[in-house]
Structure formats: structure tokens, C-alpha cells
Amino acid sequence: MDLLGRSVVITGGASGIGAACARAFSAEGAKVAVADINGEGAQAVADAISGIAIRCDVAKEDDVRALVQTCERKFGEIDIFFSNAAVATGGDPISTSVETWQQQWQINVMGHVYAVRSVLPSMLARGEGYLVHTASMAGILTSPGNLAYATTKHAVVGLAEWLSITYHDRGIRTSLLAPLGVNTPMLGGGDSPFPRAAAGPVKEPEEVADMVIQ
């Protein structure tokens, strides 16, 4: 897909991979909407790339629908929806509360589902669209000490695979992003167990953004 003039929506765009990808898409000539529950952070990223910022809690379907409607009013049809927002808390099956499970499921999985429900009908109607989903290598392998995150990211992998197989022949493209350790706020710095659990060197968000663009 030639990105010049295309409209891109990125959730979790206020920092980390989302912010780096927002800058990378903009550099390719795309119109970018930066969505995040951190509205001020999203605005700062959007201001730097002449994009638009929208506060959005992806755990709420009404928020995601409103995000899509706002972007369609600003940009017209959405060409690329990049579901990137996620949270991680660590934990195991005994210590992790049911409330934490529910929170991570809503953000890490249902946020992707709500996005698909909101943008896929119009993409199918015109026979074109691109869905990008951030999972993690935790969703293909696992993440020691981080059960809920690994489980929800496995679900994202399954969702993306299903979408790719089901809608490819109708013009819908689906990509799955599954990096190892990336130097983002989620990683928590050098004292976090997550960098130590990452297999391989920790990448910078800009490196991941280059891969996404390619």
C-alpha cells in the first residue's frame, strides 16, 4: 500500500511503538490520528506531526466507535487501523486478581475486536483496507512472570490469523506485529522483570516503526 495521502488511526499512540509509528507514517505522507487514553500525550505526538489527537479508552466499544466516527469526519474513509494499545502488569494464576484479568482482556483483546467491528464493514464495502495488530512474541512464545499479558497476546495472534485467512480475498490485509523486548514505558526500565525475560536485545521503538512501514 502506498501510504501517501492514506488515513491511519493508531491506538496507544501517545508513547512507545505507537508514537514512533505515528511519526513514521506521517513521514511517508499519511494522515495520522493518534488515539490514547492519555489525551495530553496523544496531543503532543499529534502536534509534532500535524495529525489529530483523540482521547480513547479502547476497553470501551463506545469510545472506539466515537474514535472511528471522528476520524471519518476528519479524513474520510480509514485506510489503516493500527490496534496497538495494551497494558501489562505481571503476575501468575494465583496472585493475579480476576479484576486484572478482566482489565487486560478488555484492553489487550477486546480493544482489537471493537476496532474491527467499527472499521471492517466499510472496508469490506469498498474492497480495501488494512488492519494492523500489535501482539508480542509473548503471544507466540510466552512471557515468564507475566501470565495475563501472554494469554491475551496469544488471543490477539489468533484474531489476526483468523482475519487474514477469512478476508484476504475480499481486499482486506492484516498484519501482526510480534516484537520481542522494545524500549517503551511498558517495559519498565532496567529494574523490570520484562527486559530480563525478553529473548534477545531490546529494540528501540523507531526500529520497530521502520519494520511496520516496510
Image (cartoon, helix red, strand yellow):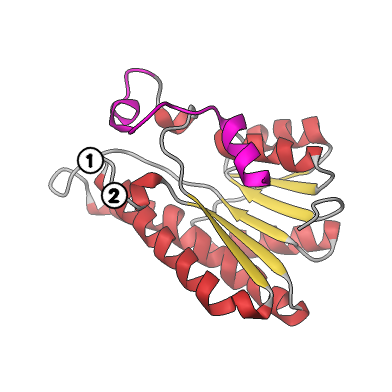
Alpha carbons under labels 1 and 2: distance apart: 7 Å
Q: Amino acid at mark 2?
A: Ala
In the picture of the structure, the residue carrying the numbered disc 2 is 148
Residue 62 visible (yes or no)? no
Q: Residue at x 67, y 46 (%)?
A: 214
- On the image, the x and y values in percent for residue 49 come to 80, 35
- On the image, the x and y values in percent for residue 4 come to 85, 50
Residue 83 visible (yes or no)? yes
In the picture of the structure, the residue carrying the numbered disc 1 is 91
**Pointers 1 and 2 in contact (C-beta within 8 Å):** yes
Residue located farthest toward the top when viewing the structure as drawn: 190
Under tag 2, what secondary structure?
helix
Under tag 1, what secondary structure?
loop
The segment highlighted magenta reads: 190-214
- On the image, the x and y values in percent for residue 202 come to 44, 27
User: Within the image, what quadrant is residue 120 found in?
Assistant: bottom right
User: Within the image, what quadrant is residue 105 found in?
Assistant: bottom left
Task: Decide whether residue 197 is among the magenta residues.
Answer: yes
Q: Residue at x 72, y 35 (%)?
A: 23
Q: Is residue 46 above or below residue 128?
A: above
Q: Amino acid at mark 1?
A: Gly
Residues 17 and 113: in front is 17
Q: Residue at x 72, y 38 (%)?
A: 24
Residues 67 and 8: in front is 8
